[in-house]
Image (spheres, coloured by chain):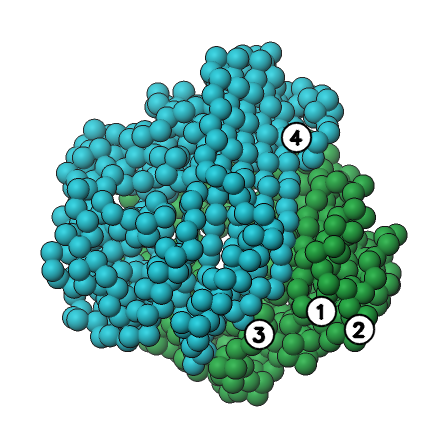
Chain colours: A green, B cyan
Amino acid sequence: MFNFPEGLYSDVRIEKVRATLVQYLKGELREMRERDTAGAFIRVYDGKRWYYSSTTSLDKIQEELERLAKLASPSKNIAEDKVVKNMTTVKGKPHGFAGKDLRTVPLAEKNAYLSSFFPAVTSEKAITMWSASYSDTFTHRELYNSKGGQSVCEQQLCGMRIGMTFAESGHTFTEGAMKAGGEFSELGDFKGILESRICQSLEFLRNSTRVQPGKYTVVLSPLAAGVFAHESFGHKSEADFMLGDEAMLKEWHIGRQLGPDFLHISDDGAQAGSGFTPFDDEGTPAKKTTLIKNGKLAGRLHSAVTAAALGEEATGNARAISFEFEPIVRMTTTHFEPGNMSKEELFAGVKDGLFIDTIKHGSGMSTFTIAPSLAYFIKDGKVAGPAQVSVISGSVFDTFGHIDAISDKVELLSFVGGGCGKMEQHPLPVGFGGPYVRVREMSVL
Amino acid sequence: MTKETYTLIKDEVSVKVSASAPESLRNKRIKRTGVRIYKDGCLGISGYLGEEGEEAATKRAEAALAYKIAYPCQPSGNLVRNVTVGGKPFTPGELDAEVAAILASLRKDFPQFALTSPSVKTGTYTEALKNDAGLDLFSAITMHEFVFLYKQDTSASIMDGWFAYGGHEYDRKTFLDYAGQILAAHQRVVPLPKEGKLPVFFDDCDCPGKSIFGRELGGMNFGSGGSLFSGKTGQKLFNENFTLFSSRAEAYLPFFDAEGVCAEGFKYIENGVLRAPFADKKTAAKFGFTPSGTADAVYDGTPAADNGAMRIKSQAKTVKEMQGGEPAIFVSMASGGDFNSEGGFGTPAQVAFLMQDGKLVGRLPELQLTSHVYDMYGKDFLGVSSDNIMPLSNSRWLGFMLNVRKM
């Protein structure tokens, strides 16, 4: 397909995307579009440096390959380079999307479905401002490399979100309801989610009280636990942060005990949903990577490049947000595995704590943070009224050791309209979720 | 019927740095064009990538009028203006050499630090908005963005801190002096002088304490009664010295917004008095506001008001004068905090320095900062300095008295 230059490793990633967006602001239509785009990302490697180009001129990919090759220094031994050795030679069978193609669902049907939920919002007087959106993407991705490897895959994601601002008696509160999945039919139970969220939000608006800053035992919902796993630990398992860093490799060595023996965390690109990555953007097929097993560090997330550097296997986690960017090590669907007790037992063990149900955002470095939205006091094992919390945080190094219970059922979640940010690449669709997780000594503001 | 084209061109070179060495060189030239058709109070939009496709996009935009996206405003017109800001961007070879020189210098002077960078970028960003109502606006801005993350060789964190420069003009010595000041201060661990209320300074372009105005001054929310500040226009809510305004120029944005509105200096809060929310034309028309000239849009999207260019008016005092000889805190990184629904503020400060007479003197432990919007911008507002944090950038020191305690 391409004449790859001699003495160099090179690959070409072509992306063709159909994206739909329908968006309303307080019942007024603001956006309704179907967008078709195509572009390519080209990489050339000479054993020392990478040379990249992104272009929308698919007929000029060969020219770009040759232009980049002129910047590089070809090597007779490029095939022996350990990074190149790690690149795929697999000619993967095309991976088509098995379900109903979102492109065949008429725009009018998507719009009508979204609009059908408006009465639940407009009938509630305390909702002073709201937005509603339906979005979907169908992505066709092809990858060809100079070792003969190639992959062709198609994937899709759709979802709805209704954001609402509640105001009453001088108090305001903003929340949202979301549902996402790989197929249009997966959005079917959105009505119940929306109505429940409106009820919760009204209660929060009317009855929430400010939490006293301090240290609390905190129960994280599957959503909050997912963010916690992603922010507090997931990013540290991305191996590009460890390259050439002896201190970090020593601190995060495989086998290190991080938490209790019922603590297990995985990343799985084969999992359906917003983190689904059947082949990564280097052509490596998806696999489940166990990051923590029995409380001990068990694995890392890799691209072909980082795997070569650390002498480990590529894990299918080299991902880019679009054809404009190079693949870097990213998570897919990251979650806690089932734990050691039922949800009811987990709550029953809290005398005076907090339950974090939904969140606004999270971040993670040496200290991770979660900004809760719907949060509740827990008194004597029972949820006891809504709590206003600005942020919960903790040290990544210590917090896993403070986990003292994980519930026994996992709920995985998908998302649209946002995603993970790393370096300059945001947003990347990821999935997360998990069981309920109880953590002691969380810092609460 | 009015036809309008909105063209965005990103022409960019970047170098990525890993383990204190250049890892990759990337070229990007992406052109996006949106075609907008205004007719009978409605707006139809479509777009395309690359050089060709206007005819087909025009047909799609005309067809999109059937969606009945209301736009009960006149498109901007009768204005021709062409503004080019900044000099020449680096060529790929020049940028590569510059990054190599920076790394060589920092490796020599600070061998105990490993440096990474998601991208050291240089580029020209072009926007043009033209229509057959006589609008012909063109902006070309050349920008350099040098962002470096650092970590000490003994640290097990992903990163220990960062230093960055963004601006039109670049000078290696100035950048290295700034980087050296941060890295030197990082090595000197100092205790927090005391817990309690302390003067705390932020980069005014990157302050989590400003986020509440982006959230609560959105025109639709404000006009609908859902904002913390709804119904308070004209009231003196904040400190006399607090003036919040829009400056696209200081934010390195084109002089016109995505609707062709030019409103540099638009005031949201003036001397503590709430004046106006930010609003696009449609929202402004709905509620009787004035368009703030801050509408943003993807190339093929409907323009919507954005808060990206909010600045706080600076005072006559330098940061040293604002400190008045007392120790203060400079927060270099505060990630993950937020305001709650009632205006309460809390954030961890992951990277903070002790500052004396406007100079960083040492690194503080991780901190927790709390306050409330009406305190931060009321009795506890210290203001924005007259001097820049770094001479080449637009960032200034923004100070508050905040409740501070160790994490």
| Distance of label 1 from label 2 (alpha carbons) | 9 Å
In percent of width and height, residue B192 lies at 21, 71
**On the same chain: label 1 and label 2?**
yes
Q: Earlier in the sequence, mark 1 or mark 2?
A: 1
**Left or right: B403 with respect to A384?**
left
Residue A434 lies, with reference to residue B49, above or below; the image says below
Specify the quadrant that holds the C terminus of chain B.
bottom left
Residue named by callout 3: A243
| Image quarter of residue B6 | top right
Secondary structure of the residue carrying numbered label 2:
loop
Is the residue under label 4 in contact with that under label 2 (CB below 8 Å)?
A: no
Which one is closest to the eye, mark 3 or mark 1?
1
What's the chain of the residue with tag 3?
A
Is the residue under label 1 in contact with that under label 3 (CB below 8 Å)?
A: no
Q: Residue flagged by tag 4: what amino acid is it?
A: Gly
Which one is closest to the eye, mark 2 or mark 3?
2
